[in-house]
């Protein structure tokens, strides 16, 4: 860790919360248990298993549908303040509409929530983490404007069933992945590629409205009796200009990747980021479209969405350098590489070490810059880090020194943002509690503090060295003293 940082800087502020996270499709399994219906991920992995790196599915995953008691034990061992998990829409509300609630679905989440509370662990619940009911996808999914009502109805069911015990709510996890990747590439479900980002932009707008309706329902009907907090979670990379000439491109990338999903909610004026709205309108006209491909918000919709947050939920993993595309340069448009609409290209710095999954480059300072940027954009908002973590592969085993190093250096930068820059970070969540179904990487990318043996029918969980590191960090509430986890100073066992 940085030389000369006094111990005060490396101590967490009073009341700071620590958590660990998972999501329903990635850990639960039980894909067709009881009356559960198919989600878009059940369909996707069964119909397109060539897209998943190891041809696997989440049919059983970590089997948390049966092993949730062990999960609670692990959380207790870690000593976390909260557990972030998500609710499977198709398990709780099988038709996707709220005409029928599943008794088994209800029982599963009640058991989990009560079990956590009994051990003094707070549930932090994501209402939607990518597993849309297939029934709703058949009606257009997130591109159908009625999705905002379907989602709001489902959210109301969730609040009324669990709101007495759940005080931290997340409506939707990572809209950028849902809309830009889900409706712009075939890499993740539904994998419906609609040209010219028509699907992506429809999804973007409908999702903003869906989130806002759920927030308003909580605010009006449930907050007065339950006093919880609720927001949305965005996935943010840090973007830095490759050279001084690239500041314009970088600014566009920030507005396109953050702004399209944060500006409508967190900015004072609401609505789309101005540059994005203008550029898409010009491009659409040139392409012969009658109206902008980015659907406009009405005045009422701007007001509906604006201010619908109690905190800023953020997943952060990595950074990119941004530059303008060179004249005549041929790059394949992809949300993680090149944006045709705004003509910017992402690169990684040659000095950044990358994790085995390819996209996760290590640049801890980017975390601090990002936190500073959020404060600059949206003022003194409370920030909850809802995911941060590192991927290893099958060769890693239990001595995960590189994961520990990732956590130490990233958490150090977060502490600097809190202590030196006055950024109001209220909590931090490690992704993930255990190895799980890592979407298109299948079980090849391992983000777990706990290792899971996927060849064992009991899905045995074993703590990695990083569990010890985290347990110490959480117990002592400071980064001081974690140097001993450096590989050369510490021997496992
Ligand atoms: C997040 N990328 O997804 C999700 O919220 C988790 O479900 C997931 O397991 C975790 O991060 C680790 O990947 C991401 O390609 C998926 O840039 C892909 C990317 C980033 C985040």
Image (tube, helix red, strand yellow):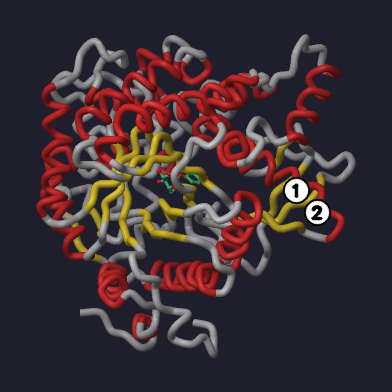
Give yes or no for contact between labels 1 and 2 (Cβ–Cβ under 8 Å). Answer: yes
Name the image quarter holding the C terminus.
bottom left
Residue 107 x %, y %:
11, 31
Task: Give 373 or 43, whichever is nearer the viewer.
Answer: 373
Residue at 76%, 26% in the rendered image: 280
Judge from the rendering whether residue 329 lies leftward or rightward of residue 72; answer left or right. Answer: right
Above or below, 450 against 400 in this view is above
Q: CA distance from mark 1 to mark 2?
A: 6 Å
At label 1, counting other C-alpha atoms closer than 10 Å, the crowd grade (few under 14, some 14-19, many 20 or more) is some
Residue 392 x %, y %:
40, 60
Residue 152 x %, y %:
38, 22
Residue at 46%, 60% in the rendered image: 425
Residue at 49%, 20% in the rendered image: 142
Task: Give 428 or 284, whichever is nearer the viewer.
Answer: 428
Q: Secondary structure at mark 2?
A: helix
Asked whether residue 457 appears in the rendered view, the answer is no
Residue carrying label 2: 247
| Quarter where residue 238 is shown | bottom right
Task: Give 151 or 341, whichever is nearer the viewer.
Answer: 151
Above or below, 33 against 458 in this view is above
| Quarter where residue 434 is shown | bottom left
Residue 127 x %, y %:
34, 33
């Amino acid at each position: 860790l940085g030389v000369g940082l006094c111990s005060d800087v490396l101590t967490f502020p009073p009341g700071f919360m620590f958590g660990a996270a998972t999501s329903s499709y990635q850990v639960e399994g039980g894909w067709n248990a009881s009356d559960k219906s198919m989600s878009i991920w059940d369909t996707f992995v069964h119909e397109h298993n060539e897209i998943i790196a190891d041809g696997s599915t989440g049919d059983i995953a970590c089997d948390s549908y049966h092993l949730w008691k062990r999960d609670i034990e692990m959380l207790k061992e870690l000593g976390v303040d909260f557990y972030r998990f998500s609710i499977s829409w198709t398990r709780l509300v099988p038709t996707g509409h709220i005409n029928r609630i599943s008794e088994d679905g209800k029982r599963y989440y009640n058991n989990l929530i009560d079990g956590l509370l009994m051990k003094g662990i707070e549930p932090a619940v994501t209402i939607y983490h990518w597993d849309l009911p297939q029934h709703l996808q058949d009606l257009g999914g997130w591109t159908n404007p009625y999705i905002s009502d379907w989602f709001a109805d489902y959210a109301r069911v969730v609040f009324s069933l669990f709101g007495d015990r759940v005080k931290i709510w997340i409506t939707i996890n990572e809209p950028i992945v849902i809309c830009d990747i889900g409706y712009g590439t075939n890499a993740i479900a539904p994998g419906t590629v609609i040209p010219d980002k028509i699907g992506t932009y429809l999804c973007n707008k409908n999702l903003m409205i869906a989130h806002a309706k759920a927030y308003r329902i909580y605010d009006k009907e449930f907050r007065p009796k339950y006093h919880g907090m609720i927001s949305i979670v965005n996935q943010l990379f840090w973007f830095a200009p490759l050279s001084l000439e690239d500041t314009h491109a970088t600014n566009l990338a920030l507005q396109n990747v953050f702004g399209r999903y944060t500006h409508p909610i967190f900015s004072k004026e609401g609505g789309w980021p101005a540059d994005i709205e203008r550029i898409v309108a010009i491009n659409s006209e040139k392409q012969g479209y009658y109206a902008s491909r980015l659907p406009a918000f009405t005045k009422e919709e701007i007001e509906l969405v604006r201010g619908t947050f109690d905190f800023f939920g953020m997943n952060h993993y990595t950074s990119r350098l941004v530059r303008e595309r060179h004249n005549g340069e041929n790059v394949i448009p992809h949300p993680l590489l090149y944006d045709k609409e705004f003509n910017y290209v992402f690169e990684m710095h040659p000095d950044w070490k990358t994790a085995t999954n390819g996209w996760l480059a290590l640049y801890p300072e980017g975390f601090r810059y990002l936190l500073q940027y959020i404060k600059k954009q949206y003022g003194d908002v409370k920030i909850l880090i809802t995911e941060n973590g590192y991927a290893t592969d099958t060769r890693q085993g239990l001595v995960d020194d590189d994961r520990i190093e990732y956590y130490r250096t990233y958490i150090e930068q977060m502490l600097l943002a809190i202590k030196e820059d006055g950024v109001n970070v209220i909590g931090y969540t490690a992704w993930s509690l255990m190895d799980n179904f890592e979407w298109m990487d299948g079980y090849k990318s391992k983000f777990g503090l706990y290792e899971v043996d996927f060849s064992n029918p009991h899905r045995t969980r074993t703590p990695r060295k990083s569990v010890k590191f985290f347990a110490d960090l959480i117990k002592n509430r400071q980064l001081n003293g974690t140097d001993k986890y450096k590989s050369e100073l510490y021997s496992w066992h």
